């Protein structure tokens, strides 16, 4: 039990020092991972106007699979089936959504489709992924020390990751210039790579990736960046925490190609709200597109083309 503002400040400083960080007026923000895997964020005055703020995000030790997501109402069985097929067929997948929408949870569920024989390398700001495969190499960024030296960011880890012979690369969250290295990895034989990004729609996710590449001062024109994106990303999954509190997959969109300078996309699944119950819960269905996918050849190579269309047919059946 916290007794006072001073007590909270003392607790924050003890937490920060335990993970090798400093928190005071000269360094008023800290973000770290505790030994049990929890994420902790601390903000001190003068940035925090009413005293120190301490936020702790705890994660369940039980990994959530697609069956649990279906039970939670996050998606329907046909949508789950198609996403499982996408992961097994080694499509490059980007998960988009807001804070707390369930991006990492879905990424963990998708990762369960990776074959045990594959060597998977993860790059994270703070380790949250719970991969079950035996050949997993986990890399985590490191902040600068008290002297402001020794920082290792995601881009540094991405450059090193490519030298470690991974079959797939999973980036916990793409938020900066490492987006360029992610696209390069996806374009150079690391099929089945995955990442997450903060965005409101699948179209916005591509814009965010383009902006992040430009943040790296590559000097590339927008058309060249979009060509890289189209060649790298196969599928974008939009997850959303809706106004009833439920977390749902609201869009599954395929990146098809280019028409002029515009990236063409196909919404395979689009969630549409139809009604609202007395308890405030939202009810809806998925609008389905049966346009032949651009990844049809890759699906055929894995013998999953018929399963893909079967999942779409099941989605068209009345509930």
Image (spheres, grey):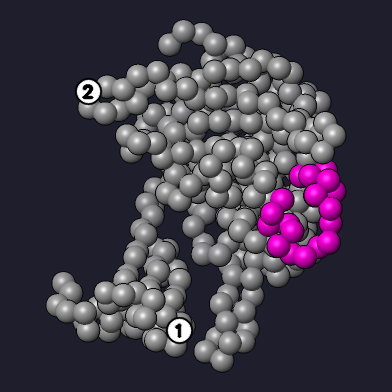
Residue extent of the magenta highlight: 210-229
Q: Compared with residue 287, is residue 225 higher up or lower down, i.e. above or below? A: below
- CA separation, marks 2 and 1? 48 Å
Is disc 1 placed on a helix, strand or loop? loop
The residue carrying mark 2 is 278
Instruction: Give the quarter of the image for residue 94.
Output: top right
Residue drawn at x 42%, y 80% is: 28
How far across and how far down the image is residue 47, in percent? 39, 76
Residue 27, disc: 1
The answer to which of marks 2 and 1 sits earlier in the sequence is 1
* Predominant SS along the magenta part: helix
How far across and how far down the image is residue 236, in percent? 63, 37
Q: Is residue 138 magenta?
A: no
How far across and how far down the image is residue 305, in percent? 72, 20
Instruction: Give the quarter of the image for residue 212.
Output: bottom right
Q: Compared with residue 229, is residue 288 higher up or lower down, i.e. above or below? A: above
* In front of the other: 131 or 288: 288
How far across and how far down the image is residue 310, in percent? 62, 14
- Quadrant occupied by the N terminus: bottom left
Residue 49, disc: none
Q: In this view, does 215 lie to the left or right of 243?
A: right
Residue drawn at x 57%, y 24% is: 269
């Amino acid at each position: 039990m916290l007794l006072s503002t001073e007590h909270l400040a003392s607790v924050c400083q003890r937490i920060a020092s335990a993970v090798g960080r400093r928190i005071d007026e000269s360094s008023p923000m800290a973000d770290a991972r505790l030994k049990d895997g929890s994420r902790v964020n601390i903000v001190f005055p003068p940035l925090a106007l009413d005293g120190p703020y301490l936020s702790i995000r705890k994660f369940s030790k039980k990994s959530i699979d697609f069956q649990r997501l279906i039970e939670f109402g996050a998606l329907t069985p046909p949508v789950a089936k198609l996403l499982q097929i996408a992961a097994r067929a080694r499509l490059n997948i980007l998960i988009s959504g807001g804070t707390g929408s369930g991006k990492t949870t879905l990424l963990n569920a998708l990762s369960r489709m990776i074959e045990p024989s594959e060597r998977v390398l993860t790059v994270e700001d703070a380790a949250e992924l719970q991969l079950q495969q035996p050949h997993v190499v986990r890399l985590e960024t490191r902040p600068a020390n008290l002297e402001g030296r020794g920082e290792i960011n995601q881009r540094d880890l991405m450059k090193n990751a490519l030298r470690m012979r991974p079959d797939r690369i999973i980036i916990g969250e793409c938020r900066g210039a490492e987006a360029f290295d992610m696209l390069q990895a996806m374009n150079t034989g690391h099929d089945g790579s995955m990442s997450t990004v903060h965005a409101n729609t699948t179209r916005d996710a591509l814009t965010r990736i383009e902006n992040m590449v430009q943040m790296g001062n590559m000097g590339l024109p927008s058309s060249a960046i979009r060509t890289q994106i189209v060649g790298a990303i196969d599928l974008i999954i939009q997850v959303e925490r809706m106004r009833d509190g439920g977390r749902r997959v609201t869009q599954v969109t395929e990146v098809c190609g280019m028409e002029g300078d515009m990236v063409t996309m196909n919404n395979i699944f689009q969630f549409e709200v139809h009604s609202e119950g007395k308890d405030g819960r939202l009810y809806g269905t998925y609008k389905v597109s049966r346009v032949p996918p651009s990844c049809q050849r890759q699906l055929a190579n894995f013998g999953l083309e018929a399963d893909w269309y079967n999942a779409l047919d099941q989605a068209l059946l009345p509930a």
